[in-house]
Image (cartoon, helix red, strand yellow):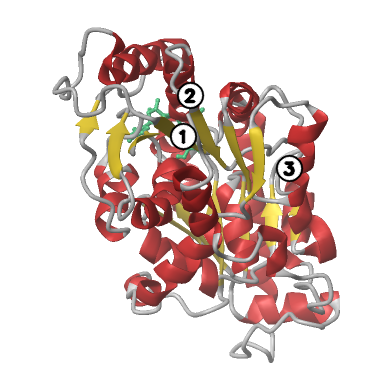
Amino acid sequence: MKIVSVVGARPNFVKLAPLHKSLSRYSDHIIIHTGQHYDYEMSDIFFKELQIPRPDINLGVGSTSSGDQIARMIRGVEAELGFGKSEGNGGKGIASKPDLVIVYGDTNSTFAGAFSASVNSIPVAHVEAGLRSFDRRMPEERNRILTDHLSDLLFAPTITASTNLKDEHSAGRIINSGDISVELVNEAWRFSKKSAILKELSLESRSFVLFTMHRAESTGSFSSLKAIVESFQELKKRTHDRSSSSSLMHQKISGIGSSSSTNEQNVHGHQLQIVFPIHPRTEKILKTYGLYDKLVSLENVKIIKPLGYIDFLRLVKESYKVVTDSGGLQKEAYLCSIPCITIRKSTEWVETLRGGWNKLCSFEKDEIVNSILQPRPSTEKNYSKDIFGSGNASEIIRDSIIYGYRK
Ligand code: UD1
């Protein structure tokens, strides 16, 4: 069986890793990289660390306007599938006329891959199907909806996702595979526990908040970015001012089961740091708005370049809390039992909201600071990794494709 996976951005690569391992033994698995992400830290490092072979074809579309980017991807993928003139570095026909095209998640590369295959009557499988934030302003939401309705096999990571697909009367076959990230996190942790990142950044376990922000809806707004800078400034005031007089100066942060004030003192005792692996787009926009230098000047903020998966996972696991606008990080934090504050109006990972493990928060200084300083969830009563399935999604997906699927 000849299978083509189309990927292009970080969140695609991490989902490809476990499935490639599982599929490559049973099929001819060709990888097309659209080139949506191209920096070493945004692309190559994931292939290297997660032991994914170099893509067979790289279309090199790069960054441009969304419509142009998607159009170039469609033209490129279509050609590689054997239906047009090749413009990338492929053109050797290796991806020509496959039995199936697999796409992952909700990026522009996901939609472009699904569309190119579908218009040429090549069946499509969507890994991470059915997620909905019900916020159509997000490009990812549009990509998800379009991709799901073009796909023949819909691999739903959660029960909610599978219900969404049924509610929308999706034409494809829905398979409750569970989420492929469970395997990814388990596998990557074997390497992450040896990561030297804490030492490199002079960080202690639970003494920092891991912060990421890159989405178009949040980075596009000056007031949102300003609120972030002000929150970190305020956090510095609230944690540093009292820490100097605190008898808890060297006390370890536990936060679990403690009252709010005790928790705050514990946090103060550790002079909570913010660690911010910065996405290239966010860096550019912060500089344009004149906020970058202000952020860099805050002594409680460490801005670092984007990290590979191994170091990043270690930071997630050792953090006090995670603050993010990312989709994938919400569930990675959950899988690591780290409370997450999601600076968005909605989430597609609704199950993670139970028990306070994930909390939606607006771009408002006090709300962000208070959410960070709030105690961590006090019991594990409402916590269950089962929300993401049994941890064998790659096998379920592989078996459905290889044995259960007929053209
Ligand atoms: C994309 C996905 C998003 C995902 C994110 C992970 C879409 C619509 N969004 O967003 O769901 O969470 O990837 O990072 O597909 N840039 C570089 N170097 C790179 C890549 C990007 O400098 O290697 C800069 C460019 O200025 C570019 C900007 O980042 O214009 C945005 O990149 P783009 O690929 O459009 O989307 P992401 O924001 O990364």
Q: For the residue labelled by badge 2, is the local secondary structure a helix, a strand or a loop?
A: helix
State left or right for residue 83 relative to residue 378.
left
Ligand 1 is found in which quarter of the picture? top left
Q: Residue at x 71, y 27 (%)?
A: 170
Q: Tell me which amino acid carries mark 2.
A: Ala
Mark 2 touches mark 1? (CB < 8 Å): yes
Q: Does residue 77 sit above or below 399 in this rendering?
A: above
Place of residue 33 in the rendered image (x, y in percent of width and height, measured from the top left)? 30, 33
Q: Residue at x 40, y 78 (%)?
A: 193
In which quadrant of the rendered view does residue 344 lie? top right
Q: Is mark 1 within 8 Å of ligand 1?
A: no
Residue placed under numbered mark 3 in the picture: 162
Residue placed under numbered mark 1 in the picture: 103
Place of residue 10 in the rendered image (x, y in percent of width and height, measured from the top left)? 41, 43
Q: For the residue labelled by badge 3, is the local secondary structure a helix, a strand or a loop?
A: helix
Q: Tell me which amino acid carries mark 1.
A: Val
Q: Nearer the viewer, residue 259 or 379?
A: 379
Mark 3 touches mark 1? (CB < 8 Å): no
Q: Residue at x 30, y 47 (%)?
A: 41
Q: Is residue 107 visible?
A: no
Q: Residue furthest top?
A: 85
Task: Estimate how packed mark 3 is, as few (under 14), some (14 to 19) or many (20 or more) residues with alpha carbons within 10 Å.
Answer: many
Residue placed under numbered mark 2 in the picture: 114
Q: For the residue labelled by badge 1, is the local secondary structure a helix, a strand or a loop?
A: strand
Which of the marked residues, 3 or 1, is nearer the chain's N terminus?
A: 1
Q: Is residue 317 visible?
A: yes
Q: CA distance from mark 2 to mark 3?
A: 19 Å
